Image: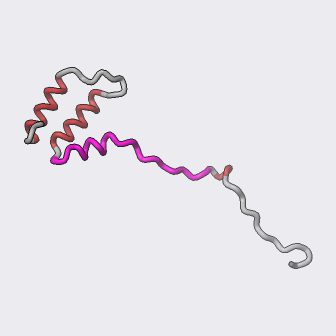
Amino acid sequence: MAPRASDRGRLVEELAKSAMPDDERIEAAEYIGILREAAAARNGWKRILVRCAPAPRRIASAPESLQAEVPVATADATGT
């Protein structure tokens, strides 16, 4: 581990020139970008955590065609 940001940056550049992880799920450019950002930050692990976290899930509302219609109360012929 390098104590200074400049040392960490140098290590990331050395890593970028060497072999990348052998995994088709990893994009080399994104991998190095995440490491560069983390190396420049004081708490780099937080940057890695944010960049590698899954995208937030959105809760979609049901389309109008699937929403139940609420019947409107009407008075009957007897007035009740």
Q: Is residue 11 left or right of residue 50?
A: left
The x and y percentages for residue 37 are 21, 40
The residue under the point 19% across, 37% down is 36
Residue 5 sits above or below residue 15 on the image: below
The residue under the point 33% across, 23% down is 23
The x and y percentages for residue 62 are 61, 51
Of residues 27 and 4, the one nearer the viewer is 4
The residue under the point 10% across, 32% down is 10
Image quarter in which the N terminus is found: top left
The residue under the point 30% across, 21% down is 22
Location of residue 76 (image quadrant):
bottom right
The x and y percentages for residue 48 are 26, 41
Q: Residue furthest bottom?
A: 79
Location of residue 80 (image quadrant):
bottom right
Residue 5 sits above or below residue 29 on the image: below
Location of residue 67 (image quadrant):
bottom right
Q: Is residue 3 magenta?
A: no
Look at the image and give the residue range highlighted in magenta.
Answer: 42-62
Residue 69 sits above or below residue 9 on the image: below
